[in-house]
Amino acid sequence: MIVFVDFDGTITDVDTFDALVRDAVGNEFWNAVDAELTAGRRTLRDVLTLQASRISKSEAEALAFVEATATVDPAFGPFVRAATARGVDVSVVSSGVASIIRATLARAGVDVPVYANEVDFGANGWSIAFIDGSDNGHDKAAAVRRARSAGHATVYIGDGVSDFDAAGEADRCFAKAGRALEAYCRTQGIACTPFHSFAEIEAALFGDAPGADRAAS
């Protein structure tokens, strides 16, 4: 089994990139750009490029902001350890910023492979070096397909728009309760298990976790 996990809003309680954008330009700009994405007038890659160009924080400032703004699910570390003990690989796949993700996970004591975008933290605006040419800013579904082609059972865990395609490719999907991915799976007929904490996913995949209820499929 291989488990692929989104970062922003899935492992963390808030989307760190969205929070950085809102802090830089305010809610009105963010909402206007998000509306264009929802209407299909911009790709997620276009939106990320535009939003990043409005952020001028240094890497150190961005990391400090994320540390003060976002919290890693305290059950994520135990989930990774439970997976590792069973020979299950866990990788983070994100359309966000790799260096921020790695630093945030390291602060939480979690060490897993991270596949995400790199950023030039320019004082006049960030520039994203995308991991691939996908309109989603990262073709997460491709990673799932490669794993399935190699004979692995695949699990995808996410919450938002960039997770839609990957969720449809995985053998099993967990969607953050009340978020866009859960609604998308319901409307598209994709089987998914809603969750609030990684303790629920640990219970569902590996057996009862202490203090967690088994997630219903």
Image (spheres, rainbow, N blue to C red):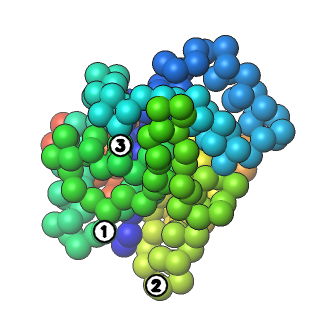
Residue at numbered disc 2? 151
**Inter-mark Cα distance, 1 to 2:** 14 Å
Label 1 crowd bin: few (<14), some (14–19), many (20+), radius 10 Å: some
Relative to 57, is 38 on the left or the right?
right
Q: Nearer the viewer, residue 147 or 41?
A: 41
Whole-Å distance between the Cαs marked 1 and 3?
Answer: 21 Å
Q: Earlier in the sequence, mark 1 or mark 2?
A: 1
Q: Which residue is mark 3?
A: 100
Amino acid at dot 2: Gly
Mark 1 vs mark 3: give the one in front. Answer: 3
Left or right of 29? Residue 206 is left
Please tell me which of labels 1 and 3 falls first in the chain: 1
Q: Callout 2: helix, strand or loop?
A: loop
Q: Quadrant of residue 7?
A: top left
| Circle 3 crowding by C-alpha within 10 Å: few under 14, some 14–19, many from 20 | many
> Residue, x 30% and y 34% (percent of image)?
60
Residue 84, above or below 42: below
> Closest to the observer: 208 or 63?
63
Q: Which residue is tagged 1?
A: 89
| Residue 94 in view of the camera | no
